[in-house]
Amino acid sequence: MNAFLSMRHYGLLATDDNEYGLSSLGEDLLKTEDEQAFYERLGQHILLNLHGLQVVEAVHSLQAGGVKVTVAAVAQELTTLGIDSGGDSGENINPLRLLLERAGVFTGKGQWTINAAVVKKLTGASTGEIVEIVGLSKPQQAFLRALATYTDEESPVASKVRSLAEGQAPGVRFDTKTFAERVVKSLAENGWLVNEKATAGRGAKSGRVTPTKKFREIISEPLMKAVLEQTHFPDPVSLRRPLSELLAVVNDAKNETNHARGLALEGVCIQVIRIIGARFLGWRVRGDETAGAEVDLVAETSNDPYLLIQLQSKASAIDGRKIIDREVGVAQSLKSNVILFVSAKKVGEAARRAADVYMQETSLAVLFLNETDLRGGAAAVLAGIAREWDHVRLIKAKRGQERARALTE
């Protein structure tokens, strides 16, 4: 049971109950034959998703101040950041440090010497850059992350990026009264972006923001590189093009080849996943293998609650219940929490009715995005997702009321 609980804590299991099913990360690690590659992949997960970077930053801070690095000292540093490390003794730190040591992040058995080259390799940032990033407030970090995924325009109004950040990180909320001063102006003063006054109108107070060379080198390019390495995507340019432009390629069967349309549809899928703040896990069906007809991928959110998202996209309309039946069947084996259907055209009523039936009878959430949602860019995608979740809650609430009545009759 201790091993089971540890695996669940490190995100290697797919569920929070007592079923022994591996998560996608667990499956990936199981397939990794090289021992060092195994620990580097796990170490990367710890650094990016389990406060590993904060541990590295805490160690770096202590060393820079001439303080002896001990578990208790690291625990105290983490506590000031609001991170629970297992009480004053920091009982969660030693096993985490050991795994990072095996990944090469710390060198020397039982030592705290940081291997900056390995940190750079696994995260895309140097220890100095990590210290600077970790030192930013959560709203500032969320804003920069959103800016890195924003493709609608080169210099967006800051309020648009703020809305995207709130959609990507539900736990982060911006104080609109202090947003311009504490987030935008502060990031500009520290060289992350250029803030220019916008024309009069909504969002004008915070102005327009343009990424700087520092932002591109430390944040956007490493993030882009990580996405390309994860997806093995052959067209990096697509990840920087506005969603509406990619959609136009998908829908241009007259002038575009099936291969080009398939790549554009893959680009749409990856951008949607990035917009909603999820992380790509793997492809199921590649567009170039299906003449651009459809693309399947699997992604996850690291927010609370954890969600395993199964995305099915089609260049054509999503009509009828056949595709819904098939994806629900696939979800049973993948143990997906969410099925997200993305159509470059429209979504038919028959498909929606079938989805409603499945949501009444299972724990699945089924969401739809259509051409209008995609054409409107990041804001419209987030609005579409919010609309769909409202519908999910309505269906689940209705089913809950029916069950309650059945129990009292």
Image (spheres, grey):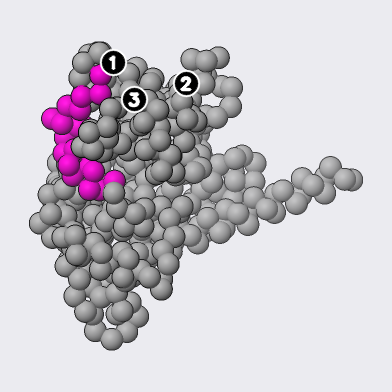
In the picture shown, does residue 393 fall above or below 29?
Answer: below
Tag 1 and tag 3, C-beta contact below 8 Å: no
Q: Amino acid at mark 2?
A: Ser
Report the mark closest to the observer, 1 or 3: 3
Q: Nearer the viewer, residue 394 or 73?
A: 73
* Sequence-first disc among 1 and 3: 3
- Residue 70 disc label: 3
Up/down of 109 relative to 139, above or below:
above
Q: Which residue is mark 1?
A: 110
Left or right for 396, reference 196: right
Quadrant where the C terminus is found in the figure: top right
Q: Is residue 127 visible?
A: yes
Secondary structure under the numbered disc 2 in the rendered image: helix
Tell me how far mark 1 sits from mark 3, CA to CA: 11 Å
Q: Is residue 10 left or right of residue 279?
A: right
In primary-sequence order, the first of circles 2 and 3 is: 2
Q: Position of residue 138 (x, y in %)?
A: 36, 53
Q: Earlier in the sequence, mark 2 or mark 1?
A: 2
Which residue shows up at 19% across the image and 75% down it? 196
Q: Is residue 99 left or right of residue 105?
A: right
* Residue beneath the point at 59% across and 40% down: 363
CA distance for labels 2 and 3: 23 Å
| The residue stretch that appears in magenta | 110-134
Residue 243 point in image, percent of width and height: 26, 60
The residue under the point 55% across, 42% down is 364
Helix, strand or loop at mark 3:
loop
Q: Which residue is mark 2?
A: 6
Q: Amino acid at mark 1?
A: Gly
Establish if 78 lies above or below 28.
below
Picture quadrant of residue 79: top left
Indicate yes or no whether the magenta region holds residue 200.
no
